[in-house]
Image (cartoon, helix red, strand yellow):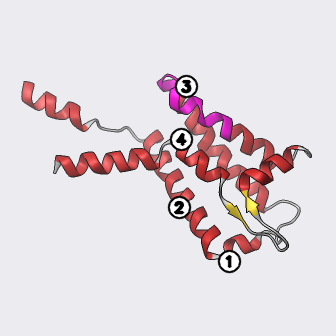
Amino acid sequence: MDLVNNHLMKIVSFLSHPILITALFCVLLISGEAWGGIYFQYIILGLIHGSGYSVTGLIAICASFPATIAPLMASKVSRLAMIILMPLSLFLFFTGERKTYYSATFEQPIPLLMLVFWGSCMLLLVFQTLLPTKKYGNEKKAIRQG
């Protein structure tokens, strides 16, 4: 049973890693009426105009790096910034001036599956960041010593 828990925790830890979530965020497929692409492309193109979705997306991407190497408190703050800013960036993007222009993203299976997978990984990050986690290896040592 411990072996299953350890493997499950490794999978959850991998899927909720900030770098993986950032990579998935950057390569989300966006489908428009005329053309589409990855979300990072839209973030870069929006920076020229100072778009809100672009600025929040870039800040969220930059927040993912301290989330992996910083001390615990800074890591939590960076993860919380990612949790808030990434979905906010997508919300601002899809509800912006061209609301229906990118609606094909929610109709085509591949972009929709990528969005759902990214959202699932984000939920794992939310749970891992906000809920206290148990260290299974330390419990076993405490039982043996006690």
Disc on the earlier residue, 4 or 2: 4
Circle 2: element type: helix
Disc on the earlier residue, 2 or 1: 1
Q: Main secondary structure of the magenta part?
A: helix
The residue that label 1 is drawn on is: 107
Q: Any magenta on residue 68?
A: yes
As measured in the structure, the alpha-carbon distance from the residue carrying label 4 to the one carrying label 1 is: 28 Å
The residue that label 3 is drawn on is: 74
The residue that label 2 is drawn on is: 117
Q: Which segment did they paint magenta? A: 61-73
Front position in the image: 28 or 94: 28
Disc on the earlier residue, 2 or 3: 3
Q: Do the numbered discs 4 and 1 sit on residues whose CB atoms are within 8 Å? A: no
- At horizontal 48% and vertical 43% (from top left) the residue drawn is 17
Q: Position of residue 131 (x, y in %)?
A: 41, 41
- At horizontal 42% and vertical 46% (from top left) the residue drawn is 14
Q: Any magenta on residue 141?
A: no
Q: Which amino acid, by three-letter code, is at mark 1?
A: Glu
Circle 1: element type: loop
Q: How many marks?
A: 4
Q: Do the numbered discs 4 and 2 sit on residues whose CB atoms are within 8 Å? A: no
Q: Which amino acid, by three-letter code, is at mark 3?
A: Ala
As measured in the structure, the alpha-carbon distance from the residue carrying label 2 to the one carrying label 1 is: 16 Å
Front position in the image: 63 or 97: 63
